[in-house]
Amino acid sequence: MKTTTTRAFQCVGILAVGALLLTACGSSDGGGAGQAAAAGTFEGRGPITFVAGKDTTGAIQPVLDRWNELHPKEKVTFIQLPTDADAQRQQMIQNAETKSDAYTVLSLDVVWTSEFAAHQWIDKLPEKQFPLDRMLKPVVETAKYRDGLYAAPASSDGGMLYYRTDLLKKAGIGRPPATWAELKADCAKVRKLPEAKGMSCYAGQFQKYEGLTVNFAEAVNSAGGVVTDADGRPDVDTAAAKEGLDFLVGSVKDGTIPKEGITYLEEDGRQAFQSGKLVFHRNWPYVHSLAGKSDIKGKYAVAPLPGLSGPGSSSLGGHNLALSSFAGNKATALDFMKFFSSEENTATLLKEASLAPPYASLYDDPALVEQYPYLPVLKESILNAVPRPRVVQYGDVTAAIQQEAYAALTGSKSSAQALKDLQEALRKSTGQ
């Protein structure tokens, strides 16, 4: 158990995260958060914290409110981190490296599981206490490390192509593009319409952050290449990978991707699409809920991502719930993880925020499909998704990808040189 002095020191070190943290660093009287249980014991009851990226949907707090109403002596406080995934990861790592008990349940990007588990920053979970057999297999795999369960699947994510149905129809285009060449050709037709004056063609997430890693990997995978092979060995200096990166670089050069597109994070692109600045937009399912409340309601739909010669491959996204190894009140935390990741609550988050649920049955529910017609596309995206490199040194790997992909996009390196340099950087990072 940490001393009061230790807890006070930790509070000073994390004041920048926000005032909400102070409640987690106070006295541990009555089995509070300061009484960290040993890994794997899941002991202690009382207040906990839930740590996640900023909730742009407004759907998370109502779920936490329901828990708090049912558990007035074991309330959960929501600590919201930046929207930037890299900043989220860094703050969670800083908390772990100081062995602070300020964070209890962590909402981890699915690709962070191996790194956090290998460093013993999160606890191994009792696998039989979670209904994994009812969940999509690719989603479950993201929560495991060395055959152990280190997180509870809470939401998945598959990239999809959002497109303006009204403009494609007016341009005489009967279906969304399945290839990159079709996307460019369709956009050229649409932009001739008076209604499309001033519109750009396409955007994803191309700022130098985790979103660029995702979009780069999708381009490589959609051209038939890989970033790392099945054994985790880098294999990115290939003709197929070059075709994928060339699509992105060429699209910036020819204006398919607007100049400002290389500054976009998820929210920037969503807002551009909703405000009528984009014909096509690559993003996650959460956009559907928000776009459906905007001026383009009823004027858009979703399709699989296009690829080089046919439908492309999404990177597998989503968030899992992990339990900080340094937290207290782990019995409460485990119960909260089961509650938050239940089929009932993930169905609510699907309805309220278009968050992709981990449960297979929800994608096949006729009533839900009628209400959310994008569900079959989303399920296909998840089942055919390619995981980002599942490596312990993920921070180094994603930093290298962002560095080299951004250099190519901005023209400071050729695609060939960027991929050559990336191959070498990944070899050093993975030791292979």
Image (cartoon, grey):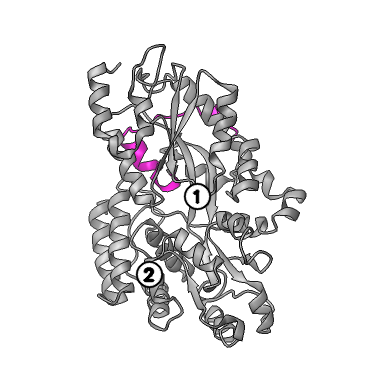
Residue 188: image x %, image y %? 54, 85
Q: Looking at the image, which is closer to me, 312 or 237?
A: 312
Q: CA distance from mark 1 to mark 2?
A: 22 Å
Q: Does dot 1 land on a helix, a strand or a loop?
A: loop
Segment colored magenta: 109-131
Q: Residues within 10 Å of mark 2 (few under 14, many from 20)?
A: some
Vertical order, 297 against 336 (above or below): below
Q: Is residue 267 left or right of residue 177?
A: left
Residue 145: image x %, image y %? 41, 39
Q: Residue at x 47, y 25 (%)?
A: 333
Q: Residues within 10 Å of mark 1 (few under 14, many from 20)?
A: few
Quadrant for residue 104, please give it. top left
Question: Is residue 150 at all visible to an observer of this figure?
Answer: no
Quadrant for residue 251, please give it. bottom left
Reading the image, the residue beneath label 1 is 56
Callout 2, which amino acid? Ile
Quadrant for residue 120, please give it. top left
Q: Is residue 52 magenta?
A: no
Residue 136: image x %, image y %? 59, 45
Question: Is residue 343 at all visible to an observer of this figure?
Answer: yes
The tag on residue 111 is none
Query: Which quadrant: the C terminus?
Result: bottom left
Reading the image, the residue beneath label 2 is 262
Q: Is residue 118 magenta?
A: yes
Callout 1, which amino acid? Thr
Query: As drawn, which residue projects farthest toward the top?
Result: 30
Q: Does dot 2 land on a helix, a strand or a loop?
A: helix
Q: Looking at the image, which is closer to me, 411 or 315?
A: 411
